């Protein structure tokens, strides 16, 4: 079968398997999920805002981790269409207090999210009101490194805006970003105090002390595949997978998904 036919089969859903539909657990994942649950639970119990920073390189699965936490909550709790327990928002690439508020309002399904006539202060008030009315208990801001990368007054104002939002609500806040997101907390003492909890979510490493975790990951992936395979945990295969992926689960999934697609 040539490449065009393969593509057509993929487009028509004949090759529907992807590891992205599976959530692979690891010791790092379990620690991070526990930390998320702790922050969420503390905020619920004390009725005070708590902050958590999840930082690490691109491709390690930070956003996927939080989305899995959201999915597990939805399974455990009764589904109320009027309630949004956890709100996941992608931060604008050039954040200001106004466009950050608009992004949050859009996720809250506010029909006036992009209203040009509304000032930053009006948008802030609407965010606070809707977070409370919809029962939001945790606000997740993804791509938080944009607060560091966008070196203009608007970004600093957006950081202060987050602090003000924490003051006005009693919910948990989670920032997800690349490692340099830490610089935001180093430069802003008040935010640093609010986000005192940090999860370093890193790529898998391959040393005498850590290689077992990578081997366990390969075993878990092998067990999810719909086709027969050679052993993923033979010494030579372990090394090949590590060198090809650099310990990043995103690369690993791309490699394995492509291999499954070719043999199905």
Image (cartoon, rainbow, N blue to C red):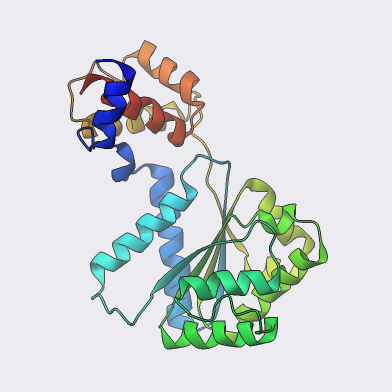
Q: Nearer the viewer, residue 27 or 249?
A: 249
Q: Quadrant of residue 100?
A: bottom right
Q: Position of residue 116 (x, y in %)?
A: 65, 79
Q: Position of residue 197 (x, y in %)?
A: 58, 62
The quarter of the picture where the C terminus appears is: top left
Q: Is residue 190 visible?
A: no
**Looking at the image, is 35 positioned above or below residue 124?**
above
Q: Nearer the viewer, residue 54 or 126?
A: 126
Q: Quadrant of residue 124?
A: bottom right
197 with respect to 214 (left or right): right
**Residue drawn at point x = 46 percent, y = 60 percent:** 35
Q: Is residue 136 visible?
A: yes
**Looking at the image, is 30 positioned above or below residue 152?**
above
**Residue drawn at point x = 22 percent, y = 19 percent:** 229
Q: Quadrant of residue 24?
A: top left
Q: Position of residue 198 (x, y in %)?
A: 58, 57
Q: Position of residue 228 (x, y in %)?
A: 17, 21
The quarter of the picture where the N terminus appears is: top left
264 with respect to 58 (left or right): left
**Residue drawn at point x = 29 percent, y = 78 percent:** 81
């Amino acid at each position: 079968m040539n490449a065009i036919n393969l593509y057509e089969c993929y487009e028509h859903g004949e090759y529907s398997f992807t590891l992205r539909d599976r959530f692979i657990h690891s010791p790092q994942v379990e620690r991070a999920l526990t930390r998320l649950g702790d922050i969420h639970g503390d905020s619920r119990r004390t009725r005070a805002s708590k902050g958590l920073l999840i930082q690490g390189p691109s491709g390690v699965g930070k956003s996927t981790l939080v989305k899995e936490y959201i999915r597990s909550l939805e399974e455990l709790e009764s589904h109320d269409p009027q309630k949004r327990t956890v709100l996941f928002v992608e931060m604008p690439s050039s954040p200001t207090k106004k466009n950050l508020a608009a992004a949050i309002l859009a996720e809250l399904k506010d029909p006036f999210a992009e209203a040009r006539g509304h000032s930053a202060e009006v948008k802030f008030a609407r965010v606070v009101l809707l977070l409370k009315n919809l029962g939001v208990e945790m606000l997740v801001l993804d791509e938080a490194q944009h607060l560091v990368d966008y070196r203009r007054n608007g970004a600093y104002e957006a950081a202060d805006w987050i602090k003000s939002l924490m003051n006005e609500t009693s919910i948990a806040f989670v920032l997800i970003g690349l490692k340099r997101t830490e610089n935001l907390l180093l430069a802003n003492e008040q935010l640093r105090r609010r986000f005192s909890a940090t999860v370093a979510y890193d790529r898998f490493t391959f040393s005498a002390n850590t290689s077992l975790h990578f081997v366990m990951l390969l075993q878990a992936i092998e067990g999810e595949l719909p086709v027969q395979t050679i052993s993923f945990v033979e010494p030579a295969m372990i090394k090949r997978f590590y060198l090809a992926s650099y310990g990043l689960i995103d690369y690993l999934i791309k490699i394995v998904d492509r291999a499954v697609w070719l043999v199905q």
